[in-house]
Image (cartoon, helix red, strand yellow):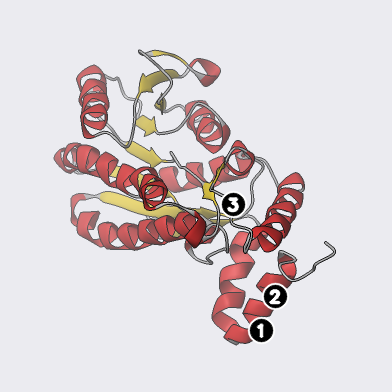
Amino acid sequence: MSGTSRVALVTGASSGIGRAIAERLARDGLEVYGTSRKVPSDGPGPAGIPMLALDVTSDPSVQACVDGLWARTGRIDVLVNNAGYLMVGAVEELALEEAKAVFETNFFGVVRMILAVAPKMRQQRDGSIVNLSSLAGLVPLPFWGYYSASKFAVEGLTEALREELRPFGIRVSAVEPGTVKTALYSSGRKARSMEAYAPRRARFEKAMRQLEEKAPGPQVVAERVARIVHSRSPALRNPVTREGRVFPLLRAWFPRSWFDQGLRSTFHLDDEHF
């Protein structure tokens, strides 16, 4: 049984944004548990944070992780759904099974965690659920079509869930980072290459690498998550980074043709000599 500390569960906490979030919440005095698919059994993680084995694409794995944590602590106050999966390629380049794999992690993984944790939080009549979405969940990017679609789905789920769980004292929010220096982009799996898409895809990937080089680290996301977790009335949507704040506004304000031209220019999609 946990003492007076709030208990937080952070998925995908072995590196990147998840690790930064886990470390930030631990510094704030929360009793933090991270998760990773690569942990064969409970073991120490970043900054000594206990790591739990979890595969968000597996119903039994999710239930075993949440039930085990509940048995250990007697409460779960914070759930941060951070685990994510990126596969780069045009919509036509990804096989259907590859597209399903993106959704299994990014969307249904979030659903599985919520289905396992929400009953515990309703029992407590209190809790905070933070879903890591993306700027791509508000402004879709070419060659990230399925990733964007999965994050759009997270946005819709978050908005509906926020109202459904509000009467039980459970706060639900989404965080939408723009470009952040993280292994997600560099380690994203590549789909099969079709010659018809290769030139523009290569320019998009080069532009994305350049943006990543100048991007802030994952700590900026961790700071925003910490503010949400400590708030009794957090915002529904929480953009992070300059482009995370600006791009959705430009998409809403500008005529579609202007915005599309700006997107193509930003990623040099039509610049043959880029």
SS label for mark 2: helix
Look at the picture and state if 231 lies above or below 239.
Answer: above
Residue type, mark 2 in image = Gly
Q: Single out the mark in the foreground, 3 or 1.
A: 3
Q: Could you tell me which quadrant the N terminus lies in?
A: top left
Query: Which residue appears at 66% of the width and 58% of the height?
Result: 198
Residue type, mark 1 in image = Trp
* Residue 235 seen anywhere in this rendered image of the structure: no
Which of the two residues, 189 or 4, is positioned nearer the viewer here?
189
At which x and y percent is residue 268?
75, 66
* Residue 174 seen anywhere in this rendered image of the structure: yes
**Residue at numbered disc 3:** 193
Q: Marks 3 and 2: in contact by CB < 8 Å?
A: no
Query: Which residue appears at 64% of the width and 55% of the height?
Result: 241
Q: Residues within 10 Å of mark 2 (few under 14, many from 20)?
A: some
At which x and y percent is residue 203?
73, 59
Is 143 on the left-hand or right-hand side of 124? right
**Residue at numbered disc 2:** 262
At which x and y percent is residue 37?
40, 25
Is 116 on the left-hand or right-hand side of 87? left
